[in-house]
Amino acid sequence: PVEAPSEIKPETGIEQGVKGAVGGVEGGVVGGVTGGIVGGLEAAPPPPPPPPPPPAAPVRVGGNIKPPTKVKDVKPVYPAIAQSARVQGVVIIEATIGPDGKVQEAKVLRSIPLLDAAALDAVRQWQFTPTLLNNVPVPVIMTVTVNFTLQ
């Protein structure tokens, strides 16, 4: 056209052979559904599986929680420098025992600087019976002592 029309008629969609709203689909739902399928619904995807339960937090030995039994004991190696300096005593360690009975973590609570590393090395090799809570193995936190005595 050379001239602009004086009025513009609203589109009805009928001119294109489609019944209903502009851009609608024959057999569609009034008001429309994004992603809809003519004649019904597509099977919904299954819901995602539930997340796995979080690992049990370690429980502290005491009360109804009995300490596990040590089944593998490794004696600490007395450091030569500590022997020559005539250092002896008790190193106290807080150990986290896993559900499998193995030491997962160990940290010194009462330190004797020349003996700490030897005590930690020994404790990390210890193994225990699993601690059961409601018949399920759980990690536990317990305090252990390592004695160093000069002969």
Image: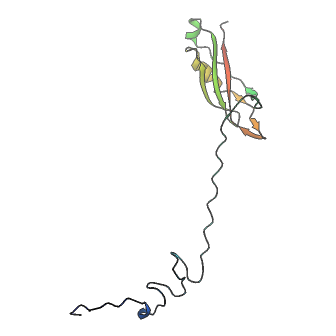
* Image quadrant in which you'd find residue 79: top right
106 left or right of 3?
right
Tell me residue 32's x, y (percent): 51, 79
127 left or right of 35?
right
Q: Observer-nearest residue: 68 or 39? A: 39
Above or below, 48 relative to 68: below
Residue in the image at 59% along x and 15% along y: 115
Tell me residue 7's x, y (percent): 30, 91
Q: How is the image coloured?
A: rainbow
Q: What residue occupies the far front of the structure in this picture?
A: 7
Which quarter of the rendered picture does the N terminus lie within?
bottom left
Numbered label tally: 0
Tell me residue 147's x, y (percent): 67, 14
Tell me residue 138's x, y (percent): 71, 38
* Image quadrant in which you'd find residue 50: bottom right
Which quarter of the rendered picture does the C terminus lie within?
top right
Above or below, 148 relative to 36: above
Above or below, 89 relative to 105: above
